Image: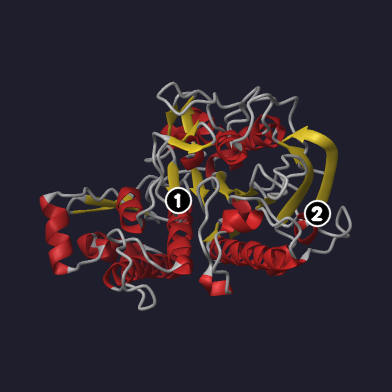
């Protein structure tokens, strides 16, 4: 009997939009095919946080599989078998190397490029191509979007933001080329619209907004037809997926309508939530949807610009993050930084839970991902750029031995890790920045 089949690239078409689908059983080829052709793709996300950490609280106790998470990373306990904690890595070109102050700009711009930024506040920017863009240049044609760049804070692309360094260096971790940053999107709705191909300012978009319709309403007919012809397990996946898409839209609409009562005098840019947790989780959810639908396989996400001085009232931190990072061993400031570090990890754990809740073939989206979380500053008080706070979540399609704390030789280039990730993405980069080889991610 003939079985109904659709291709992996099938989208539900509507008015001015196309909705990509998660991996379904009916997408498997009718004829026998190699495991390589039917296996889910591997994805990479690069998540940056500013100002370093309290290193003693970040650092796990023990090595190999016999490790215990430090206080900062305790929120990741339920994912201890899904993560690889990497100690001993360094980003040499985040250091001054004769260029004087400006560590936060260098931390940000060197994080994914592994290159020394030219110290300038003018238009003659020069740093390097970042790992996410290097991968996207090689595999980006496999997806509708070659990459996505997200963030939580707007940033200027000109002017002096850090001791003679251009604001572009502090505002971007993603660089298409040595002189061209890949600007991030901080508006959840705009990121969502880009993900699902919704054209801003179009007649259809205005009509959709006026009627407060969901993107799903435009593809309802196709969705109903597909659901009728799909099997029971696929129907359940489709229902869960459609519900998650609609929930994101509803959250974005709610966040755009309400201004937090505690800050009535603050004028918020349209559609950007005023509450940190709402904003960060919306962006994490958009990344999760991007990976689940295979709309892109490469994402970068900045939790803050270089030297961000955001406050964190959710954890009773009223002073700015950057200001606190220069704590000079004052215990009250260290205690506040501990709360910030842990709070950010709690949000990251929420993201991992979303990815792990998304089934894909006989595993999950998290299993087929590599989610890097870290910074090119370890100790923010002293501006150290060795023994960086770096962890990698996900098994990279079964190519990474997780559930371990690995201590590499001191001063091992962080860029060696990026080469290892590029191999698993099919990009096979030979070098990046000051890389010296490919980091081993297996026992």
- Say if 31 sits above or below 65 in the image: above
Q: Residue furthest bottom?
A: 261
Image spot of residue 323 (x, y percent): 59, 55
190, 241: nearer the viewer = 190
Q: Is residue 403 above or below residue 130?
A: below
Instruction: Quadrant for the C terminus, please.
Output: top right
Residue 34 seen in the figure: no
Mark 2 Cα within 10 Å, few/some/many (few <14, many 20+)? Answer: many
* Residue 319 on image: x %, y %: 56, 64
Q: Are marks 1 and 2 in contact (CB under 8 Å)?
A: no
Which residue corresponds to the image point at 51% horizontal and 52% vertical from the top-left? Answer: 304
The residue shown at (48%, 57%) is 288
Instruction: Name the residue beneath numbered marker 2.
Output: 404
Res. 151 visible in picture = yes
Q: Is residue 218 left or right of residue 65?
A: left
Q: Secondary structure at mark 1?
A: strand
What residue is drawn where x is 51% and y is 49%?
302
Q: Along the horizontal axis of the image, is 219 left or right of 141?
A: left
Of badges 1 and 2, nearer the viewer stands: 1
Where, by quadrant of the figure, is residue 214 drawn? bottom left
Q: Position of residue 136 (x, y in %)?
A: 48, 33
Q: Nearer the viewer, residue 223 or 114?
A: 114
> What residue is rendered at 45% in x and 29% in y?
121
**Which quadrant of the figure contains the N terminus?**
bottom left
The circle drawn on residue 151 is 1
Q: Is residue 115 left or right of residue 245?
A: right
């Amino acid at each position: 009997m003939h079985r109904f089949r659709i291709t992996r690239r099938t989208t539900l078409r509507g008015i001015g939009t196309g909705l990509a689908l998660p991996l379904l059983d009916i997408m498997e080829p009718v004829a026998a095919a190699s495991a390589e052709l039917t296996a889910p793709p591997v994805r990479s996300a690069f998540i940056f946080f500013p100002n370093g950490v309290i290193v003693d609280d970040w650092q796990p106790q023990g090595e190999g599989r016999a490790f215990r998470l430090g206080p900062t990373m305790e929120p990741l306990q339920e994912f201890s078998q899904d993560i690889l904690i990497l100690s001993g890595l360094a980003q040499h070109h985040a250091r001054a190397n004769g260029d004087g102050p400006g560590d936060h700009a260098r931390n940000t711009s060197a994080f994914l490029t592994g290159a020394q930024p030219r110290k300038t506040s003018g238009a003659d920017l020069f740093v390097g191509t970042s790992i996410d863009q290097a991968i996207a240049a090689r595999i980006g044609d496999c997806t509708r979007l070659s990459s996505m760049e997200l963030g939580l804070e707007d940033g200027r692309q000109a002017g002096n933001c850090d001791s003679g360094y251009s604001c572009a260096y502090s505002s971007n971790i993603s660089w298409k080329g040595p002189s061209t940053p890949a600007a991030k999107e901080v508006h959840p709705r705009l990121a969502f619209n880009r993900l699902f191909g919704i054209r801003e300012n179009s007649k259809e978009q205005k009509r959709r907004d006026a009627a407060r319709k969901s993107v799903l309403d435009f593809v309802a007919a196709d969705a109903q037809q597909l659901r009728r012809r799909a099997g029971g397990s696929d129907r359940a996946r489709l229902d869960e997926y459609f519900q998650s898409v609609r929930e994101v839209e509803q959250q974005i609409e709610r966040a755009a309508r309400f201004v937090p009562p505690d800050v009535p005098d603050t004028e918020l840019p349209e559609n950007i939530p005023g509450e940190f947790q709402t904003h960060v989780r919306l962006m994490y959810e958009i990344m999760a949807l991007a990976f689940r639908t295979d709309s892109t396989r490469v994402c970068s996400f900045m939790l803050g610009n270089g030297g961000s001085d955001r406050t964190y009232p959710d954890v009773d931190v009223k002073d700015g993050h950057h200001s606190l990072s220069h704590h000079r061993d004052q215990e009250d400031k260290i205690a506040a930084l501990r709360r910030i570090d842990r709070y950010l990890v709690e949000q990251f754990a929420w993201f991992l839970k979303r990815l792990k809740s998304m089934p894909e073939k006989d595993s999950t989206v998290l299993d087929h991902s590599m989610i890097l979380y870290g910074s090119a500053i370890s100790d923010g008080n002293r501006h150290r750029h060795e023994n960086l706070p770096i962890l990698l979540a996900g098994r990279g399609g079964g190519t990474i031995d997780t559930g371990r704390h690995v201590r590499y030789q001191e001063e091992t280039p962080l860029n060696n890790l990026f080469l290892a990730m590029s191999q698993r993405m099919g990009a096979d980069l030979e070098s990046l920045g000051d890389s010296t080889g490919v980091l081993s991610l297996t026992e």
